[in-house]
Amino acid sequence: MVDLEKEVRDHGTRIEAVEKDVIKLNKDLSDGLNRVDQSNQYLREQNRDILKEVIKRNNNADQRDFEIKKMAKTNQFKMFGMIFGASGLAALMLEIIMKLIK
């Protein structure tokens, strides 16, 4: 009988130790999950900020491309205007010279 009582007490002690370990493990796991959640939140905020900057830069790039195309078209019209204006001036000069010669 004495051995049986001793074994029961030993089992009780071991069960208490296992319960303490389970409680400690549960607390450590909760703490670890809280740290992971905080880290994930920080990373989500960083990713959101990065995405905003990328979208902003893409919009600025689109605006610059539009401005460059607009300037190119404007310069083309100016060039054609100068060519036609110069050829018109040359024709006028020739006409004046022809009138002077006659």
Image (cartoon, rainbow, N blue to C red):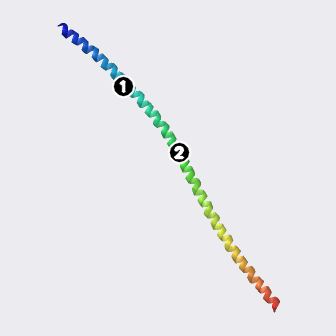
Judging depth in this view, the residue of 81 and 8 nearest the camera is: 8
Please name the amino acid that badge 2 sits on: Ile
Query: What is the x, y in percent for residue 47?
Result: 50, 43
Instruction: Give the residue at mark 1.
Output: 26
Residue 90 falls in which quadrant of the image? bottom right
Element at label 2: helix
Residue shown at 28%/17% (left/top)? 15
Residue that lies at the very extreme toward the left in this rendered image: 1
Residue appearing at x 47%, y 33% in the figure:
38
Q: Residue at x 65, y 64 (%)?
A: 71
* Position of residue 69 in the picture relative to residue 87 (left or right): left
The residue located at (28%, 14%) in the rendering is: 13
Q: Which of the image's four quarters has the N terminus?
A: top left
SS class, disc 1:
helix
Amino acid identity at mark 1:
Asn
Label 1 CA crowd tier, 10 Å (few <14, some 14–19, many 20+): few
Could you tell me residue 2's position as x and y percent? 19, 7
Measured Cα–Cα span from mark 2 to mark 1: 36 Å
Badge 2 is on which residue?
50
Say whether marks 2 and 1 touch (CB < 8 Å): no
